[in-house]
Amino acid sequence: MYCYGSGIKIKKTSLNQNTHSNHTIILAGVTGDLGGRVARFLLQQGAVVRALVRPGKTNDKLKALQKQGMLLLEVDFASASALTTACAGGTCVVSALSGLREVMVETQTALLQAAVAAGVPRFIPSDYAIDFTKLPRGTNRNLDLRQEFAERIAATPIAATSILNGMFSDLLTGQAPLVLFPVNRVMYWGNPDQLLDFTTVENTAEYTAAAALDAITPRFLRIAGNVLSARGLQEAASKATGKHFRLLRLGGLGALDTLIKITRIVSPQNQEVFPPWQGMQYLRNMLSGLPKLEPLDNNRYPHIQWTTVQEVLASRAS
């Protein structure tokens, strides 16, 4: 059955009844990988999950989550009244949106304003990154957008919490090719002993769900399923595959800066969320040591079992 009103369309389904049934979580970005996993963990805890999607975005994954009890709301994100109505009665708004400025700043601002207008007490923005608060502006386009949105959050009375998880360790098996499986090498720039933070998408989603159901959380929560240097990655890859990996130093951080500039000229792809040079910027930030996550809040929710980089790499090698 669908209900209509104030620009929203709600598909009703049965709800789980469990320990967190008094929590109503407003979730934006459920169609993405991280957002869908957050929804699954919330439903497992018995929370009421009200997922906001643009009209026509229903897919098989969402239908499966609906069968578990998720409420799906088709909302016009350009309508302040529709968003406010959608947020009414929520105990926390969780954003897992992904995009460029239009999404990460403007759409999230509309969602933030709706949360405030509806009286939602807490907001978790779509940050899920290294500690961008320690980085100078201009070193990472996507993280600059997070800093800009953080300033907008600071101007509101809502209690916000950003989940910072370093790099998604899942990317090490493909999109962030630090571990070169065909040649048994781990490539890096700069210092091979610089510590880096890695967390799986699954662990990040589980932690985000736990934070959404928490009564009081600080402005930032920092997590890392594994903290490894390039040497640590070398050891993890060797153990995961049973092959001897070696380090491959491609130069200092200045060399990586030059490569980033050249890549932006040759293949700008400025309208893509994650063009090659953006990944290079992210890696450059991590290798500098500036955005290292300290202190870690892994123990805040002791039920979470953290997946190591070695386990991730072993899944790729098998």
Image: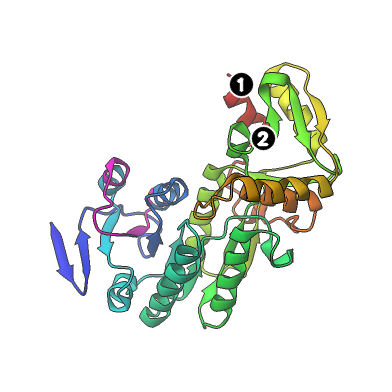
Please, what is the three-letter code of the amino acid marked with disc 2? Val
- In the picture, measured across the screen, residue 32 lies left or right of residue 205, that is left
Residue 12 location, quadrant: bottom left
Mark 1 or mark 2, which has the lower sequence index?
2
Residue positioned most to the front? 266
Q: Which residue corresponds to the image point at 49% horizontal and 64% vertical from the top-left?
A: 104
Look at mark 1 in the image and give the residue it sits on.
317
The nearer-to-camera label among 1 and 2 is: 1
- In the picture, measured across the screen, residue 37 lies left or right of residue 223, that is left
What distance separates the C-alpha of mark 1 from that of mark 2?
12 Å
Q: Residue 121 — which label?
A: none
Residue 306 position within the rendered picture, expressed as x and y whole percent measured from the top left: 62, 41
Residue 167 in view (yes/no): no
For residue 142, above or below residue 251: below
Label 2 sits on a secondary structure element that is helix
Residue 165 position within the rendered picture, expressed as x and y whole percent measured from the top left: 63, 52
Residue 135 position within the rendered picture, expressed as x and y whole percent measured from the top left: 73, 64
For residue 224, above or below residue 105: above
Please, what is the three-letter code of the amino acid marked with disc 1? Ala
Range shown magenta:
43-63
Q: Which residue corresponds to the image point at 78% horizontal and 29% vertical from the top-left?
A: 234
Quarter of the C terminus within the rendering: top right
Q: Could you tell me if the residues under marks 1 and 2 are in contact, i.e. CB atoms within 8 Å? A: no
* Magenta span contains residue 50: yes
